[in-house]
Amino acid sequence: MTTPGIQVTRLGKFDNMPLPTILAASFLDAGGHGVAQVLTHRERAALVGMSRPVEFKRDQMIQTEGARAEFIWNIVSGTAETYCLLPDGTRRVMSILFAADLIGLSEGGHYVETARALTEVRAWEIPLRALDGLVRRDPRLDAALLCKISHELRESERHLLTTARQDARARVAAFLVWLKQKEAATLHSGDLLELPLRREDIADYLGLSVESVSRCLGQLERSGLILREQRRTLRLMDVPALQKLAGMD
């Protein structure tokens, strides 16, 4: 069973489906750098034993705000977003999620936000009740999940700081640097950056208009900081300059 009204494709085989992966920057090891796998092989295997592989098509809803929370999803591939609807109907994007991230934030047994697949998404669907039982038996897994939650909290704070910037170019530059860091953690794609989001998704995430996003990308290209090789493929020509523009240096 999954969220009412949402249909997913059940993958009939586990072949070629990577084990569940959760990446996070440690809050304990002061000497650590970047993100790392926080699950042991035994924990990953245990999660497979209680989970099902699922696939969501592009633009398909994964969970809906207010629905009963029965699962969380560990993304294997693809990109998703979470958002909330404000009383005036405005859509406020809360997070952009990638491979090794978790979907399923809930409170009081109900999802607190809506999640939508921005690209085709493959994920492990993990029943919350089974996960609760596993965490009670494995305190280390509890600590690993706390590490991930802390990591996501820092990501949310970064998002708030990004959208608080008055300069639209600084917001877009910060977004490109952040997105490159997220890709580098899993793809190691050099200075090329694949944009999994459409312009309207980027605009929603940054609190800008689509026109502002397009204008800022053009300004960054004319400044020699990026090079648009294809519609959704950018080459970051000067990352330090982008970081300086974004106030991240």
Image: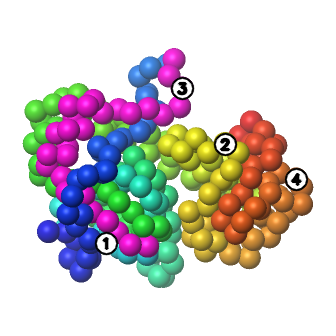
Residue 75, magenta (yes or no): no
> Mark 4 or mark 3, which is nearer the start of the sequence?
3
The CA span between labels 1 and 4 is: 41 Å
Calculate the distance from the C-alpha at mark 1 to the C-alpha at mark 2: 36 Å
**Neighbour tally class for label 4: few under 14, some 14-19, many 20 plus, Cα within 10 Å:** few
Q: Is residue 166 above or below residue 207?
A: above
CB under 8 Å between discs 3 and 2: no
- Amino acid type at circle 1 is Thr
Give the amino acid at mark 2.
Answer: Gly
Is residue 243 visible in the rendered image? The answer is yes
The answer to whether residue 29 is above or below residue 194 is: above
At 46% across and 53% down in the image, what residue appears?
Answer: 98
User: Amino acid under label 4?
Assistant: Gly
Q: CA distance from mark 3 to mark 2?
A: 18 Å
Q: Secondary structure at mark 4?
A: loop
Q: CA distance from mark 3 to mark 4?
A: 29 Å
Task: Provide residue 25's location: percent of width, then percent of height.
Answer: 46, 33
Mark 4 or mark 2: whose residue is earlier in sequence: 2
Q: Residues within 10 Å of mark 2 (few under 14, many from 20)?
A: few
The image's mark for residue 64 is 1
In-front residue for pair 20/73: 20
For residue 224, the mark is 4
Q: Which range of residues does the magenta coloring cover?
A: 31-58
